[in-house]
Image: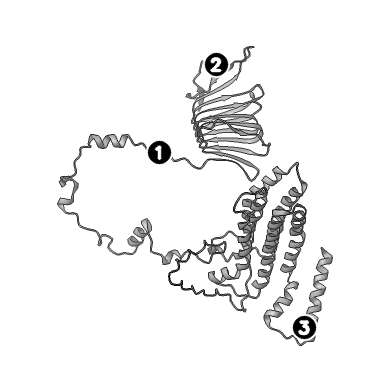
């Protein structure tokens, strides 16, 4: 790495000496391009490409096929950004239209990568999506300030990789015991962004690109639409906005306010707010209208009762997010849900499920059951806790160990504890009909049911309240 850096520095010195011998001629732009290799930020970016992107390319060469194709597009995108970083120092900060024109080469590479993920899903779809989604991290160069709507450059790089990491983790799981080249490609790609690109941006552009204050600004070239030939069909609609779309929303002050904002604006203006209201005459009042009575018709009452509100159900989900969190959401009448590949670092979040059964085959870190109805959950071991929140009539069974169980704001809960989980600490709050079943001491293998207290007696004694639960006879 140091030898390459020295070679580039020597080459740059030779070019500068040649310029000085020729009288320092040449335009400012030409001198800027010649001096670009001496810029520490450009040298560091070349090192980033050589060190991190080189690893990705080496692994892709061994894999070949579509993985190699998407990696070449990745190289084009990083190369385009290097050229833009050189031009930034020679260009004034453009307006929104000029910025879109300036970033066009980078946007073309990103669009090309996204096009490779479309169409029929291939065997390397996860590779294509990982690379294509990761390229949005390069959009940090479009950051122009807090008003641009983007996160700060460092945060943008991290957030962009989080979108790609979902597919990257799928590669790591799929090829764990198959092909080490795919594992190397996925790991190298992650390191290209974290820590590679993130640390680079943190060192040189934490507040975004630094534009020149003296050079010429970039402006968007006006495009003249061609007139359609006589009898020709109408042209197609314009394409959807790209990643660096120049269309920005108007400032809120220049748009007419709507809704309550308009009301408050008129009140604050000092103008008489009732000047535009119509006067209500006696014949317009409800009590004087013949078409209005206080009696509700039978057919109207029946129609209201026969059309109950339909509860909105969200999109069903059953997926592992970012390799750490299993999400099971909005599953209705599904009795065969199974999570088989899990580990002690992962958590399980179950939300909005109804009349379904989920099996968790393995040890996980934490289980949360939230807003579920008639839901059954069967798990083996949990490292931290099993939490039941805002539920109605749920059944949960622990086959292994569970150090902590929490039941909050739940009506109806049956919790089965195995022999290994009898030492669990159970906390309840604002809940009713909570029953815990434990293995009986008999040889028949039945369960002994114990109802947890719902009612408490509070007695003020010796300067403080003493609280005792109302005893239950269930479970003996």
Quadrant (top left/top right/bottom left/bottom right) for the N terminus: bottom right
Q: Nearer the viewer, residue 178 or 376?
A: 178
- Report x, y in % for residue 163: 61, 51
Which residue is found at the position 71% from the left and 67% from the top?
41
Cα–Cα gap, marks 2 and 1: 40 Å
Which quadrant of the structure image shows residue 108?
Answer: bottom right
- Report x, y in % for residue 25: 73, 86
Q: Vertically, is 351 above or below 101?
A: above
> In this figure, which residue is indicated by the disc labeled 3?
19
Q: Vertically, is 345 above or below 47?
A: above
Residue 207 shows in the view = no
Report the mark closest to the observer, 3 or 2: 3
Report the mark closest to the observer, 2 or 1: 1
Q: Nearer the viewer, residue 70 or 376?
A: 70
> In this figure, which residue is indicated by the disc labeled 2?
475
Q: Which of the two discs, 3 and 1, labels the residue nearer the N terminus?
A: 3
Badge 2: residue crowd in 10 Å (few <14, some 14–19, many ≥20):
some
Which residue is found at the position 31% from the left and 34% from the top?
305
Callouts 3 and 1 close, C-beta under 8 Å? no
Q: Nearer the viewer, residue 215 or 238?
A: 238
């Amino acid at each position: 790495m140091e030898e390459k850096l020295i070679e580039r520095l020597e080459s740059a010195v030779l070019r500068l000496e040649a310029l000085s011998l020729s009288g320092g001629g040449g335009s400012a732009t030409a001198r800027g391009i010649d001096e670009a290799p001496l810029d520490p930020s450009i040298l560091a970016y070349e090192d980033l490409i050589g060190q991190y992107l080189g690893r990705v390319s080496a692994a892709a060469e061994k894999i070949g096929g579509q993985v190699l194709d998407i990696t070449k597009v990745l190289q084009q995108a990083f190369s385009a950004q290097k050229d833009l970083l050189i031009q930034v120092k020679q260009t004034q900060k453009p307006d929104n239209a000029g910025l879109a024109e300036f970033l066009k080469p980078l946007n073309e590479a990103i669009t090309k990568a996204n096009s490779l993920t479309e169409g029929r899903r291939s065997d390397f779809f996860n590779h294509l999506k990982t690379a294509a989604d990761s390229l949005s991290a390069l959009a940090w160069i479009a950051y122009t300030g807090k008003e641009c709507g983007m996160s700060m450059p460092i945060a943008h790089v991290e957030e962009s990789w989080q979108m790609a990491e979902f597919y990257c983790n799928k590669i790591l799981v799929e090829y764990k015991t198959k092909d080490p080249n795919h594992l190397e490609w996925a790991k190298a790609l992650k390191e290209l962004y974290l820590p590679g690109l993130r640390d680079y941006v943190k060192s040189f552009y934490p507040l975004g690109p630094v534009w020149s204050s003296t050079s010429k600004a970039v402006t968007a070239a006006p495009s003249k639409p061609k007139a359609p030939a006589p009898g020709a069909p109408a042209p197609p609609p314009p394409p959807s906005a790209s990643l660096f779309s120049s269309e920005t929303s108007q400032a809120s002050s220049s748009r007419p306010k709507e809704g309550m904002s308009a009301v408050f604006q008129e009140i604050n203006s000092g103008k008489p707010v009732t000047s535009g209201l119509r006067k209500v005459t006696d014949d317009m009042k409800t009590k004087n209208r013949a078409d209005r009575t206080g009696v509700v018709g039978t057919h109207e009452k029946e129609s209201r009762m026969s059309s109950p509100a339909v509860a909105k159900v969200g999109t069903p989900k059953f997926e592992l997010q970012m390799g750490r969190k299993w999400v099971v959401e909005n599953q209705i009448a599904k009795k065969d849900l199974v999570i088989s590949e899990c580990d002690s670092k992962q958590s399980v979040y179950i939300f909005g499920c109804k009349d379904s059964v989920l099996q968790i085959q393995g040890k996980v870190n934490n289980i949360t059951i939230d807003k579920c109805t008639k839901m059954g959950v069967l798990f083996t071991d949990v490292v931290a806790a099993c939490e039941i929140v805002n539920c109605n009539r749920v059944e949960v069974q622990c086959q292994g160990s569970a150090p902590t169980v929490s039941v909050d704001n739940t009506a109806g809960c049956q919790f089965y504890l195995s022999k290994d989980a009898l030492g669990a600490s159970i906390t309840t709050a604002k809940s009713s009909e909570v029953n815990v079943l434990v293995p009986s001491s008999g040889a028949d293998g039945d369960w002994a049911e114990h109802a947890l207290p719902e009612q408490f007696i509070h007695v003020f004694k010796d300067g403080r309240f003493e609280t005792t639960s109302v005893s239950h006879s269930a479970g003996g």
